[in-house]
């Protein structure tokens, strides 16, 4: 009894220490005048100003967001339709599809990214934004299907029967009854897909055309070249974006506990 | 308001026969109960009339028109589901108005019709509630209002009361019957609960293993079951085995009795309803024309309005139903005499 | 109606084309004699032989598996306990914890990795296997908590009451009733954690001590230095491992559809 | 086998009073029903006796020993839950044997005791089944066997029949009563279903808003309710308002009647059970000592064993229960005369 409460507290400490404290330290340092990790912190916005003048970073951010946005739209639409198809129909490929859905999650992205690189290059799709969007859709689709399917599990299909008995056509039933009911799942899935896309640094790294870069690639390159607090500044901005995303997700996707 | 006619409906699911050559006429404006044990095909029949299932053979007509190839949404039916199936993302107003919205009825007309329907089910003023804010009985009423607001030709009810507890169910049985009578809509009601079927319907059809085994009014079927299955499934029946001896029957539990009709085979099963049996402590209190058997009270079940005695007769337990007129009980282990009239003693061949 | 079936097929094509075909191509090429992507494929195991003689790769693999194993054990144990604590008790920190559980999933690993690097370096935990295990536990814990909590959602707490009414102590109830019931969720969670750990290339990259490398880091470095089919060979082996993992997961963690 | 005594139990959840100064003696070997509407505190009381909840005030004794600080697992109780709560990862043998395994009983002894318990609930040969392979009634029996195999001092039942459908429930009511009598264990049964309470128990305690409002044998409470609440909650009651005029009561629905006891206030409510009322088409057929009121049949509800007439008397509907002796009905709209004895006419002050 006390053991579990104690575990809860340990977990809190663990989370704070290994995830949130590092993040807070980074946020704090992004406002530090000094380039070295020197204390006490002297308030400064110089790294944000440097950011504002870094046009390479701007286009990288734009690319990141464009790819994330396009791939999120595509994978959410397609993934929801796939989850519905799984729910409603028994077709021959169904079992196969349900098995094939897991590997993209368990195989390291690095390997998949490498495989895609080789393949896209080979068949002439090449590199560039279009290849990145394709890659991100393929990678985030499984998350969408899994999250929407989880929501569908508790869907009472009598609701669809009821709508049809009241005169609603197939499409009216889907749009007015099923999709509104799925909405929390769909929104959570879209946020997941967006996060996955932003996260997929390596894929982007391999698939991007030499001229096109995305934000994670930029950060990575900057880190390799030299570790400047400018990185802390951009990371802080990304964290704020992620926090907004997470608030959206936890608003729609409840889990754990009884409440 | 329409009649429904089904002809020779058959359906298999894999190797399981769900329906086997079922034909029936549902007359206009009546309340029908389809009664049967689980797996008897009653729900399949209802879903076929609704259009959710297609028959392998046979045909369905609504108002004389074949509807076999008309999809659910064009059949103009109202349906109430076991789980209520209220749309959780809509309030009561939007739930009840759904069928009208789909038909493109104007907002003001929708509001008026929804108001009327809610009044009919006694839920005026609940317009803004969400389904999860309603009790079980209220949800059932909303589901009913939603099904009838479009003035469908037929109302289909799929065990709509089975999710309610006993008290609420008794209340809703009366309510549902009242509403059906007020609206005058042809209603088909599926249930496995014989008391619901007896209480509510104008006509009962009893299904067993995909076949329609008997149909008629509740009183008719209850008083004149045509098989042991029906006698046992609709109401309670004491089934006593016996051998025919001339025009009378020698029961295995002892006693020679007269039956309503002439026994048709040498080995028979006699069926006597518990409420048709009188129980006495003294022997010759019953008219001499009555059938009599002797036994000993095992126990009594006190029910408030009535008592059921379990009486040991030979190796069999006979149930006797007695209205609670005085609150007096016959104690367990008392020897008793049971009597019942020959016209209440049905006889079936022993298979 | 046909639309959804068509979507199912599109999805199959999409999955095959953008994930499985690349992977198959990579597997095929790992058995090709030629170093260049030359057809037709000449059967050869030379890249696997090269692998067998690459001692740096061996220690990298050993490190990867050690870290993944340790962090999986720790995070599965701790995560299951946390999920149980969420389920059974209402404590003050609960709501806070439930909100804090999402960010590690939505914030790009790159950023978290950077933050951890800075922080661990700063407080003197430094780099090395112990830091990597800590980092991986912190990152995979949320997955464990979420997967086990999802399973707990359908747990009937009357089962625990029943066990106690029969005379079972708190620990007997947990070990004989609750945990066996949770087992599919716990196993799925452990496999997730293992996959996450193998996947966390960047974290490892930043946190590892100069001498200590892990498999993904090795692969990455090899790719940067020059793209040899040896990479295809090692990737093929990783894919086989992942496939085994995925079979384990899909055995225990059902999702989607009605069956 | 033990007596249970609760004294002055009180419990609040937040600002809601769940139990308010409840005291009761559960005698050794008897079958008790705790009956009440939802929220009346009956489940809280049961869970307190089990040890899942701690009282804010008061004390619980089992066999004369205070158990307030003894945890659930040490109280030596058996409990059956509403959801059955069978362990899904264990077969029937392991489920029933769980309590013995926990107590460190040897494997061979466990096997023997489990076999006995399964025989008692008539499930011999089901040892290897998993819970999901059993029907609802079978699961209930396994849950019961599991609860009694350890020979606990008290058996606690938390609405164990509410998940079963009507037919199965009637069967299990009889079965449960038989097993309880065979084992002779003190049994406390929580239910909101008055028919279950009447049918099964030796003693009923009626709870309302956290208070124990009446207790006694089923027949005693049914025939002598001490408040309108009890009259209405346990069984059905026709409640007629009236004004006292000397020793008789002028009813609002018309008619002057005599009551069992002397009315204590000028405005009263008379309560008459539906089965105590006789219905006649002719006027003076009842003995002249009877109370009489006139009405008109609204409708009848045919139930198989019985009929219920809803009779309009003034602006009120009176229910009349009649055993189905002949299958004959009085048609709706027939004027009728209702008669009932003064000793069946209870009188309560009108609050």
Image (cartoon, coloured by chain):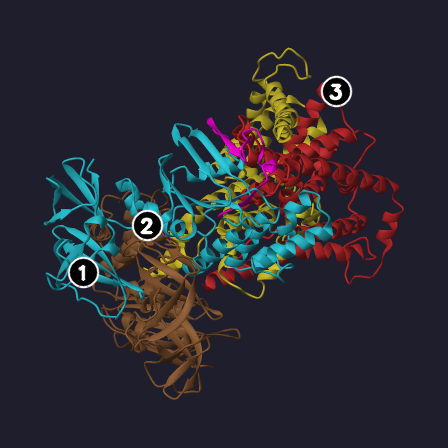
Chain colours: A red, B cyan, C yellow, D brown
- Answer with left or right where residue B244 lies relative to residue D303: left
Asked if residue A257 lies in the magenta stretch, the reply is: no
Magenta stretch bounds: B54-82
Q: Nearer the viewer, residue A35 or C88?
A: C88
User: Residue at label 1?
Assistant: B279
Query: Is D64 positioned to the left or the right of C39 in the image?
Result: left
What is the number of the mark on residue A124? 3
Disc sitting over residue D137 in the figure? 2
Q: Quick check: D159 above or below D54?
A: above
Q: Who is closer to the viewer here, C160 or B246?
A: B246
Outermost residue toward the right? A53
Kind of element beneath mark 2: helix
Q: How far apart, in angstroms, are the residues tagged by discs 1 and 3? A: 95 Å
Instruction: Choose top left, top right, bottom left or bottom right for residue A121.
Output: top right
CA gap, disc 2 to disc 1? 32 Å
Image position, residue B202 (x, y; %):
43, 48
The residue nearer to you, when weighing C71 against B123, is: B123
Pointer 2 local density, CA inside 10 Å: few below 14, some 14–19, many at least 20: some
Q: Look at the numbered disc 1 and give the secondary structure of its residue.
A: strand
Is D130 positioned to the left or the right of C153 in the image?
Answer: left
Q: Which mark is residue B39?
A: none
Q: Position of residue A40 (x, y in %)?
A: 78, 63
Do discs 1 and 3 belong to a common subunit? Answer: no
Q: Nearer the viewer, mark 2 or mark 1?
A: 1
Q: Residue D177, image x and y in percent? A: 25, 60
- Image position of C95 with respect to D276: above or below: above
Residue sitting at x 82%, y 56%: A34
Instruction: Tell me if residue B77 is in the magenta stretch.
Output: yes
Q: Is A213 placed left or right of C214 in the picture?
A: right
């Amino acid at each position: 009894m006390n053991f579990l409460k104690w575990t809860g507290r340990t977990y809190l400490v663990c989370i704070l220490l290994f995830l949130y404290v590092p993040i807070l330290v980074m946020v704090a340092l992004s406002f530090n005048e000094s380039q070295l990790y020197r204390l006490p912190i002297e308030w400064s916005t110089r790294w944000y100003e440097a950011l504002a003048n870094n046009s390479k970073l701007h286009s990288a951010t734009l690319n990141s967001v464009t790819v994330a946005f396009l791939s999120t739209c595509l994978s959410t639409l397609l993934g929801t339709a796939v989850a519905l198809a799984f729910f409603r129909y028994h077709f021959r490929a169904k079992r196969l599809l349900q098995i094939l859905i897991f590997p993209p999650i368990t195989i390291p992205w690095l390997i998949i990214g490498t495989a895609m690189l080789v393949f896209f290059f080979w068949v002439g799709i090449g590199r560039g934004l279009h290849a990145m969007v394709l890659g991100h859709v393929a990678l985030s689709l499984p998350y969408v299907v899994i999250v929407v399917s989880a929501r569908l599990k508790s869907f009472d299909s009598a609701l669809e029967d009821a709508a049809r008995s009241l005169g609603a056509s197939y499409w009216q039933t889907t749009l007015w009854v099923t999709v509104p009911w799925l909405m929390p799942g769909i929104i959570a899935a879209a946020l997941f897909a967006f996060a996955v896309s932003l996260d997929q640094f390596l894929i982007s790294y391999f698939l991007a055309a030499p001229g096109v870069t995305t934000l994670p690639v930029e950060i990575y390159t900057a880190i390799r070249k030299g570790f400047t607090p400018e990185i802390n500044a951009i990371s802080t901005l990304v964290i704020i974006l992620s926090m907004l995303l997470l608030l959206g997700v936890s608003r729609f996707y409840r889990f754990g506990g009884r409440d | 308001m329409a009649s429904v006619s089904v002809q020779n409906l058959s359906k298999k699911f894999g190797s399981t026969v769900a329906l086997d050559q079922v034909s029936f006429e549902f007359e206009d404006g009546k309340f029908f109960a389809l009664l049967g044990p689980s797996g008897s095909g009653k729900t399949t029949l209802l879903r076929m009339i609704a259009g959710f299932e297609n028959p392998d053979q046979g045909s369905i007509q609504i108002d004389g028109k074949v509807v076999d190839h008309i999809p659910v949404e064009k059949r103009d039916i109202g349906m109430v589901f076991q789980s209520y199936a209220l749309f959780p993302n809509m309030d009561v107003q939007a739930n009840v108005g759904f069928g009208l919205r789909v038909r493109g009825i104007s907002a003001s007309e929708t509001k008026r019709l929804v108001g009327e329907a809610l009044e009919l089910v006694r839920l005026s003023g609940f317009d803004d509630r969400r389904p999860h804010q309603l009790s079980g009985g209220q949800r059932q009423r909303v589901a009913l209002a939603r099904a009838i607001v479009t003035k469908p030709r037929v109302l289909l009810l799929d065990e709509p009361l089975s999710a309610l507890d006993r008290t609420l169910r008794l209340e809703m049985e009366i309510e549902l019957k009242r509403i059906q009578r007020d609206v005058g809509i042809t209603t088909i009601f599926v249930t496995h609960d014989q008391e619901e079927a007896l209480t509510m319907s104008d006509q009962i059809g009893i299904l067993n293993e995909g076949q329609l085994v008997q149909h008629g009014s509740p009183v008719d079927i209850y008083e004149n079951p045509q098989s042991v299955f029906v006698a046992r499934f609709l109401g309670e029946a004491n089934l006593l085995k016996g051998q025919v001896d001339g025009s009378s029957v020698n029961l295995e539990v002892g006693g020679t009795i007269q039956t309503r009709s002439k026994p048709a085979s040498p080995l028979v099963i006699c069926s006597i309803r518990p409420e048709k049996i009188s129980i006495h402590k003294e022997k010759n209190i019953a008219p001499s024309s009555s059938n009599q058997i002797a036994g000993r009270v095992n126990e009594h079940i006190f029910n408030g309005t009535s008592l059921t005695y379990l009486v040991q007769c030979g190796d069999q337990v006979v149930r006797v139903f007695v209205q609670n007129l005085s609150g007096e009980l016959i104690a367990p282990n008392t020897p008793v005499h049971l009597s019942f009239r020959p016209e209440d003693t049905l006889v079936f061949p022993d298979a």
